[in-house]
Image: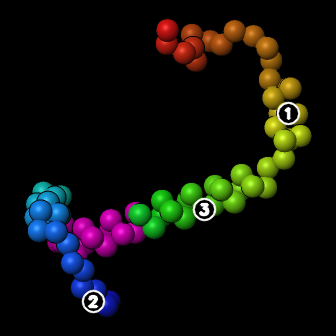
Amino acid sequence: MSKLTVELPESLQRSIAALAQQEGYSVDQFLATAAAEKMAAIRTLEYLRSEAGKGRREDLDRFLAAVPNREPIETDRMPE
């Protein structure tokens, strides 16, 4: 493990400490988990953008052409 010094507004520090305690974590565990979750979210977006960039319009059109043209079932309807 390594140490990192971070300056936070006191109100944020108090909120983090309260939430960490409420969840049964140390502040260190809470912040490490929060950082890992943020990294996962960013990496997921990067992956999805990368995959979307590989898509081809022709493939989408072919996929959509195979979808039957009929009314959706009740649970798939948009609320009015």
Question: Along the polypeptide, which appears first: circle 1 or circle 2?
Answer: 2
Q: Could you say which disc has been placed on residue 46 in the image?
A: 3
Give the amino acid type for the residue marked by disc 3 in the picture.
Answer: Glu
Magenta stretch, residue numbers: 24-37
Question: Along the polypeptide, which appears first: circle 3 or circle 2?
Answer: 2
- Residue 66, position as x, y percentages in the image: 85, 26
In this view, the residue in front, 41 or 76, is 41
Q: Could you say which disc has been placed on residue 3 in the image?
A: 2
- Residue 77, position as x, y percentages in the image: 57, 14
Q: Identify the residue at image location x=45%, y=67%.
A: 39
Rendered position, 12 above or below 29? above
Q: Secondary structure at mark 3?
A: helix
Which image quadrant is residue 17 in?
bottom left
What is the C-alpha distance between the residues marked 1 and 3?
A: 25 Å
Does residue 52 belong to the magenta stretch?
A: no
Give the amino acid type for the residue marked by disc 1 in the picture.
Answer: Asp
Residue named by callout 1: 61
Question: Along the polypeptide, which appears first: circle 1 or circle 3?
Answer: 3
The reply to whether discs 1 and 2 touch (Cβ–Cβ < 8 Å) is no
Rendered position, 52 above or below 71? below
* Left or right: where 56 falls relative to 80: right
Q: Identify the residue at image location x=40%, y=63%.
A: 37
Rendered position, 56 above or below 69? below
Q: Identify the residue at image location x=69%, y=60%.
A: 50
Q: Is residue 9 visible?
A: yes
Rendered position, 25 above or below 22? below
Colour setting: rainbow
